[in-house]
Image: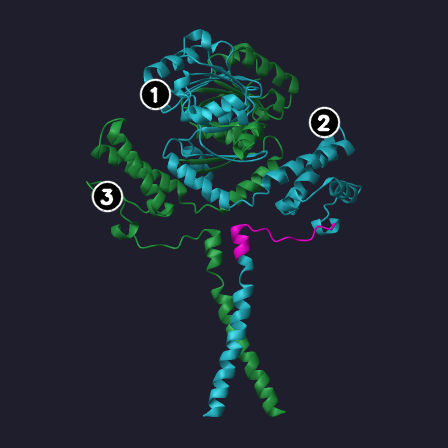
Chain colours: A green, B cyan
Amino acid sequence: MDNESSRILSLGGGSLLIAWQLKDKNVLIVGGGEVASQRIESILTANGQITVISPEDGLHPRTKLFIELRKDRIFYHDRKFEGPDDLFGKHMVLTAVDDIELSRKIVAMSRERRIPVNAADIPELCDFYFGAQIRDGPLQIMISTNGNGPRLASLIRTRLQNGLSGLEGEAIIKVGQLRNKLKERAPGVGGQLGRERMKWMTSLCNTWPMEDFARLDDTLMDKLLDEGWNEKKRVPIPEELGLVPERIDLPYVFASTMPIFPTIISFVAGALTVISLLSYRERS
Amino acid sequence: MDNESSRILSLGGGSLLIAWQLKDKNVLIVGGGEVASQRIESILTANGQITVISPEDGLHPRTKLFIELRKDRIFYHDRKFEGPDDLFGKHMVLTAVDDIELSRKIVAMSRERRIPVNAADIPELCDFYFGAQIRDGPLQIMISTNGNGPRLASLIRTRLQNGLSGLEGEAIIKVGQLRNKLKERAPGVGGQLGRERMKWMTSLCNTWPMEDFARLDDTLMDKLLDEGWNEKKRVPIPEELGLVPERIDLPYVFASTMPIFPTIISFVAGALTVISLLSYRERS
């Protein structure tokens, strides 16, 4: 059997990683502790509307801060969960309470109504899990160990962050703006023109160093389109727009520029060693 | 206003990245082209049960291969989508057809039944998006640009992959096994003992280089627990178990071990320069 077939036969054991859309959807969070505050942050990031149900004495300081600052997004009820009515009109339910029995009940009620539900610390009751995340503007990265060690997920996050320049988010924004400008010059959905647009954008993304996109401003974008998106449909190099090549300090690129210092010192050390050896011989 | 408050006020504009659990859930895929084949792969990865509805002449070779090899997971119907009955008992619906009107209808039917739905290429109709992914055993990483340029997502994936050693998945598996062994020695859920277990595992993960976990076998795990999980509750270093430190070839770590070669060469070059200068002076 070939490699591809064995690979297909062995597929399994993971989760379906997806980017859930919550814009203006209603999310119920039962509980107000530290975990609840993390959930609030995740839901705010996704532009969801949040209802928090928790007695005030159970609120973590960060939960309080969220409730106070984001009244536009958070409705807060200072009480315990009361029953099925609390689920009315909700598109997602998250429990973050110590009471496992209460969590089980809320999960059962949510399932009955086909509302996606997550119960903190009770993986077997969850429709979905959260994971460690990296956010840089439009760029979002999620790291899941499928329940095997959240600590390692966070160490892997650090490792991944070290491999990024920090300009990826900005580059994504600029590429989006450039694509919009291109669509203004060559309007229409799909068809031959749509394919040509996509082909040009793809060669551009494959040719340019990602960080050079982050350096584009309005004028440079127009210049890029003037010189590239014409009858020739060619991709100008960044230098043609006056973008001088820049050394990006990704950790490993930086490291590879380091040997110059030990090199010079060693050269001098070698020279001095010979000189002192010779002068010792001359004197003796 | 402090930094944290401004940060909280500006949260938004993203998605909720989650790891959806599909074990033995029923997923309907309408369509059989290249996009459908990518969907099938994602759902197989998450152990879902798949129903593919598509006339046979619309099947991509990879879709055919999946259907042929994974009869245990895929039910295939050689016909067009027929109506609401096709949604019966489904937990997720994915459309991957060129017919936008058909897609819209399927999305509306799914919404009515509160079944999460994704329509390929029609972002405004999707409950969730897919993204570029990295998989290494239990480790799954998803990269989302929130609809701004899939090409950049795939370039960022390459960049992230370069920052990984490739042993992270194996390390996660071994840490999971170690945690299970620890639970056998110190059984019980929660409480003081649970907190001590978690504390010990956390210090271990924070102290050891991640790749050393990948080198643990059954015997070494027992030794680690014998020497660490006793009245002292201490974390032995890898060397105590006979694990000789290994230089892991992460690109930047590797780079930082490089200077030794130019250093030696420079030392010799410095020495030779002085010698030749002196011998030149002597001869003249």
Identify residue type, mark 1: Asp
Q: Residue A96's spot in the image, x, y percent?
A: 58, 24
Q: Is residue B100 left or right of residue B128?
A: left
Residue at the location (57% across, 39% down)?
A: A154
Viewer-closest of B159 and A235: A235
Residue at the location (70% across, 37% down)?
A: B178
Whether the residues at callouts 3 and 2 have beta carbons within 8 Å, the answer is no
The residue marked by circle 1 belongs to what chain?
B
Q: Which residue is mark 3?
A: A228
Disc ID at residue A44 = none
Q: Which residues are magenta?
A: B242-255
Q: Which residue is mark 2?
A: B189
Q: Indicate whether B253 appears above or below A16.
A: below
Q: Residue B58's spot in the image, x, y percent?
A: 39, 20
Residue at the location (42% across, 12% down)?
A: B79
Q: Residues within 10 Å of mark 2 (few under 14, many from 20)?
A: few
Instruction: Name the N-terminal-most of marks 1 and 2.
Output: 1
